[in-house]
Structure formats: C-alpha cells, structure tokens
Image: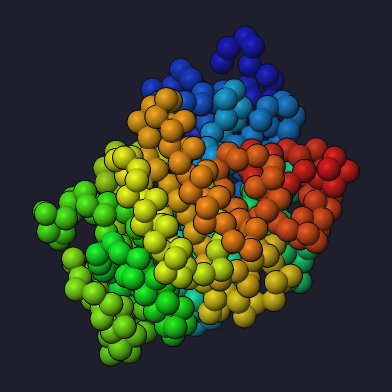
Amino acid sequence: MTLAEPAPIAQLRADLNGRFIGPEHADYEQARTVFYGGMDHRPAAIVRPADAKQVAQVVSAARDSGLELAVRSGGHSVAGHGLSDGGIVLDLRDMRGLEVDHVARTVWAQTGLTASEYTNAVGEHGLATGFGDTGSVGIGGITLGGGVGYLSRAHGLTIDDLLAAELVTADGQILQVDEESHPDLFWAIRGGGGNFGVATRFKFRLHDLPTVVGGMLLLPATADVLSSLIAAAEDAPDELSGIVNVMPAPPMPMVPAEHHGKLVVMALICFAGSPDEGERALAPFRSIAEPVADLLRPMSYPEIYPPDPEGFHPTAAARNLFVDSVDHDVAERVIERVSSSDAPMRVAQFRVLGGAISRVPGDATAYAHRNSRIMANVAAFYTGPEDRLVREAWVDEFAAELRQSDPGAYVNFVGDEGAGRVRAAYPGATWDRLAEIKARYDPTNLFRRNQNIPPAAAS
C-alpha cells in the first residue's frame, strides 16, 4: 500500500489479498498485457475476483473511490477497453465455472471462460453454442456485444441463445436478469455491451452439433473469385456460415510456399450439419476456381478454433461497416485496394449474414442490425506510431470507398473512433431506449470504459 492509495482501494487490497495486483506486484507487467499490442496502460490495480460477491466488492470500491473501472473478460477489445490508466481493472479470468444441464440442453457459464474453453467443454458432449471466430476471445465481451460467428446463420447471434444472466450493477447488487426478471435490462445486455453492469454468469441454450464440415479454402485473388464466393455464401443453406478474406497468404505449412505473402482469397467456412450435407453445400465453393489449398473437412466443432500463435499481440488499424452487396465492380476495387498496400498484413473481410440472424425482430434485442446483409472489416497491421498514421489513413479511405446504403456498425468491431461510430451501432430508437435504461441502472456512468452509452439525463 502507498500513502496516496484511496481508502476503498486499500480495503479492497486487504479483503482480496492474493487476488489484488498492484504496480509493485511481480505479475503486474504480464497482468496488464492484453491481446492487442501497442497498449501501454498502467492501472492502479488489477483485481481477479472468484465470484459475483467479489465482483460486487470491486465495483463498489471503484464507485466509492471515483477511479475509472475497466472490465476484462478475454482482453480482445480493439479499443483497449480492458485496461485503464490509473484506474481499476476487474479481470474475470479466474471465473471459469461451467454447469451443463444435459437434459434441458442449457449451461450456466462464468464469463472468464474463453470461447474455446467453453466450446471444448460442451463439445465433449456433442453440444455447442455459437460465439465468434477466435477461440481466445472471452465469452463476456463477445456476448454482450451480440456475437457474430460460425453458427450465426444456423442458430443466430450468441445473444439469441442467451436465456439469462447474472449481473452486478453499479450499486453493487447482484441481479439475475431474463425475460421475466428485469426484462428491460435483459434486452439491453443483448447487444448493448458492458454499459449496464458486470456480467458474471450467462445461461445459454445448447445445440446438438456432433460434427461440422469446415475449415479453410484458399482461392486465387481475382474479382471473379471474390464476387462468386460472396454469391455462393448468400445462396448457401442457413447451416453454412463463413468469412471471406482478401489478404496475403500466411506462411502456413499447408499453403504452397510459392504463394506465401501473395494475395489470395481465404474462405473460412463452417457447415453446421452432417458430412454428406456439408459436402453438397460446399460443392459450389470448390467449383469457383482451382484452389491454392483446400482444407475443408468433417471435424468436431471445437476444431474450428485453432490456437493463437504464442506471444501474438498484433497492432492493427481497422474499420467495420455493413454493405449491401459485393458485386464484380466492388470486388475489383477490393482487390485493387488490398494489392496497393505494402502493409505486411492487410485484409478486406466479408461475412454474409441473414439466416437465423434476420429471423429475429429488429427491436427484440439491442443488436439492431437484423436486416443487414454483409458485414465488412478492413484492417492493416502497423509497426510503429508513424506507420500507424499511414495505415489508419488507408483503412479510412478503404472503408469510405466500400460504404453503401447501410450506415450501421457492429459494436464488437468498433475501435476508438468516437461517439459517432457508437451511435451507428445503436440507431434511432435503440439508442434512446438504451440511454433510458442506462439512466436507471447506472445514472453516474460508472461503466463508461466501453463503447459508451451515456445515461439519458446526461445525453
């Protein structure tokens, strides 16, 4: 303890001895490291609670001390919201409990679990809930923002399988929220991000999914290939979800060496069904062009998440948007744009939406983009501050060129881009309703280290 330490923080240090990491702690440097590189925040304290009661202690200490509170599940926030300069980081990593009800096909899961940990655990029983496309992402953040991933067209967003949540609110209460209890709060946390409290447990619906057919298909980088892949994804059965990337081929052993670093179209595909049905669904994709590499195969669903490379902490400039179509003209511009950059890694990424996502009414959850057709992301890795300016300009120009009639944004992929992009994630009446709920449950905006929705009175 230092002389300048506020009394609530000193009390927290005493109460949660062994779970409190201050700047003097041997583990501090590692504990303040998140997935993305280039973030040098120095919190006053990092606390790793064991349960909701201890989470409530941390929340109360932040409120009473006036220090900024950052909440971290997996540490994948592209805006760095899982860290704070001089504030408290509430790190959920020790909360990894999971209770499966095999009869009801439901599970209670603590929010320190990663998508891969959760998926591996329930996958042992041939069951699944859809998250994103990266196994090391924490289930807390991805769920609160919506959850677009490999099962979205088949089963909807992650929030469409969310049945209830345990939430610690700004006043330190521990609430169970669902359709019957605090339904307004339950509506808000399904897409509204971390604005309304700390989610400590989720109750999810589980789907029977013993096998999928999926993996990676690398094709030549041409406008015909790109537009044809998008068209095939739009025409595919709802059981098929995927991601289409225009990018340099990574130096993986399964990619022929002569293609390493050369532009390719990489399709990451998951068909949530039997091998026979999957082979039929994948045939149109395989017929588009002679593949650079075809790694599509039957697999268990947990295999869809490969491990992250050891010590991988990328620094990237990125922008997110929705587009209506990727026709041949758009595809030509995409290929030209990605070809023109000399960033060591750059990508234009497209995810065809629809399916089960679009069968949920637009006002049923705080995720308001049910009718959006294609999600796009553009990104470029950078190597330092000066290079960052170059890459930021490139992604800004690229995103502006891609933008069509859909002005929305997916909150989980929005970076540190200002209030306007947050408003784009919550258009019209959605924003107004969220701000009103925020005013009731967090009137002082304690939970502001996020894509923030200020309480209505302060708007």
Left/right of residue 332 with respect to residue 294 in the rendered view: right
| Residue 136 pos. (x, y %) | 39, 52
Numbered disc total: 0
Locate the C terminus by quadrant.
top right
Q: Check the image and report above or below for 393 versus 291.
A: above
- Point out residue 421 in the picture as x, y percentages from the top left corner: 65, 47
Q: From the viewer's perspective, is 145 left or right of 434?
A: left
Is residue 332 something that shows in the picture?
Answer: yes
Task: Give the camera-side residue of 356 and 244.
Answer: 244
In the rendered image, the vertical position of residue 362 relative to residue 24, given as above or below: below
> Residue 12 lies in what quarter of the image?
top right
Farthest-out residue, right: 457
Residue sitting at x 68%, y 19%? 6
In the depicted view, which residue is nearer to us: 376 or 268?
Answer: 376
Q: Looking at the image, can residue 166 be seen?
A: no
Q: Residue furthest top?
A: 3
Relative to 189, does residue 90 appear above or below in the rendering?
above
x and y, in percent, of residue 204 in the image: 55, 69
Q: Is residue 191 left or right of residue 37?
A: right
Which corner quadrant of the image does residue 14 belong to?
Answer: top right
Q: Quadrant of the N terminus?
A: top right
Nearest the camera: 3 or 449? 449
Q: Residue at x 37, y 40 (%)?
A: 381
Residue 425 at x, y percent in the picture: 66, 55
Q: Residue at x 51, y 23 (%)?
A: 42
- Which colour assignment does the render follow? rainbow
- Residue occupying the point 32% across, 54% down: 247
Quarter location, residue 344: top left
As rendered, which of 457 and 171 lies closer to the eye? Answer: 457
